[in-house]
Amino acid sequence: MPSASDDRARRRPLRILLAAAVIALSACGSDDESEYVERPVEELYNLAMDDLTRGNAQLAAKGFDEVERQHPYSIWARRAQVMGAYAYYLDNQYDEAILAAQRFIQLHPGNPDVPYAQYLVATCYYEQIADVGRDQKMTQRALEALQEIVERYPESPYARDARLKLDLAHDHLAGKEMAIGRYYLQRGQYTAAINRFRTVIEKFQTTTHVPEALHRLTEAYVALGVKEEAQATAAVLGHNFPGSEWYQDSYALLTGEDLRPRTGGGSWISRLWNSVF
C-alpha cells in the first residue's frame, strides 16, 4: 500500500481547487449577521470555507450542504457541491464524498470542475483498496473510475496522477492473483495455480509480479511433468529478466531435472512471447 509520503503526494492535486476557491472568494465576503435560516449565500459559503481552512472538515461539509439547501439554484450551490464532496473526503467519509461528487457530475455534466469531481471519486475508491488477502471490489471500482479520467479527460491536471494510480491498482490485483496461486501451489493443486499465474502473465504484463509468476509457472509445470511448457516458460523468463533471482531459481530447477530453458512452438507462453514480449 502507498506510504505516508505517497499519501501526501496523491492528495496534492486535490488541493488545487481548494486553493483556487479561497482566492476567488477573497473579495466575496459578507459581514451580514442574519439569522441562521435566512443567511445570505456568500456568508454561508464563507463560513464553510473558514471551517475547512481551520481543519474542521466535518463541520465544513455540513456548511456546504447548507449552502445548497438554502440557495439551490445559485452559482454558490454548484461550488458548494464540489467543496462539500472534498470536505467529506478530507474527513475520510468516502461514501458521502463519492455520492456528493457523483451527484455534481450528474447535475452539471458540462461544468469545468467535472474532471476534478471524477478524480475525487476515483481517489476515494483508491484509498480504500484493501490488502491482497481481502476482497478487491474497491480496487476494481478504482480502476474503472481512474480509467474514465484517462479516457475522457486526458488533458486534465488529474490524468497523469490517474495513470500512476492505475499502474499501482493493476499491480495490486496481480498481487492478489499471485497470493491465490501460491496457495494452490503449496497444496499441490497445480492446475488451479497455473490458471492464476497465467492470469498475471496475460492480463498484468506490466506489473512487478511477472518474473515470479513465470518462475511459479515453471515450478508447477515441472511438478506436473509438462516439460515443454516448463522449458518454454523458463526461456521467456530468462529472455526478459535474465538477471533476476527468479530466473536463477527456474534455471536451477530445470537443470536438476536434466532440462534446459528453450522455446517451443506449441507452448502458449511461446505464442504470447512472440506476440507481446
Image (tube, helix red, strand yellow):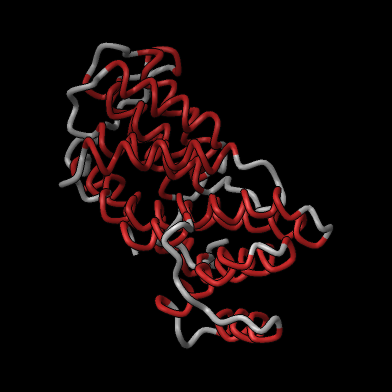
> Which residue appears at 31% of the width and 36% of the height?
148
Looking at this rendering, what residue extends furthest in the right direction?
187
- Left or right? Give the position of 189 relative to 208: right
Q: Position of residue 76 (x, y in %)?
A: 26, 24
Quick one: 241 or 47, which is closer to the camera? 241
Answer with the quarter of the image where residue 220 lies.
bottom right
Quick one: 103 or 251, which is closer to the camera? 251
- Quadrant, the N terminus: bottom right
Q: How many marks?
A: 0
Q: Is residue 220 above or below residue 140?
A: below
Q: Position of residue 258 (x, y in %)?
A: 66, 84
- Left or right? Give the position of 263 relative to 157: right
- Left or right? Give the position of 52 relative to 192: left
Q: Is residue 260 above or below residue 212?
A: below
Q: Is residue 81 above or below residue 254?
A: above
Quick one: 70 or 172, which is closer to the camera? 172
- Quadrant, the C terminus: bottom left
Q: Position of residue 67 (x, y in %)?
A: 37, 21
Q: Is residue 72 above or below residue 15?
A: above
Q: Is residue 265 visible?
A: yes
> Which residue appears at 70% of the width and 50% of the height?
191
> Which residue appears at 48% of the width and 61% of the height?
7
Q: Position of residue 275 (x, y in %)?
A: 31, 57
- Left or right? Give the position of 209 relative to 184: left
> Which residue appears at 55% of the width and 31% of the height?
95
Q: Is residue 176 visible?
A: no
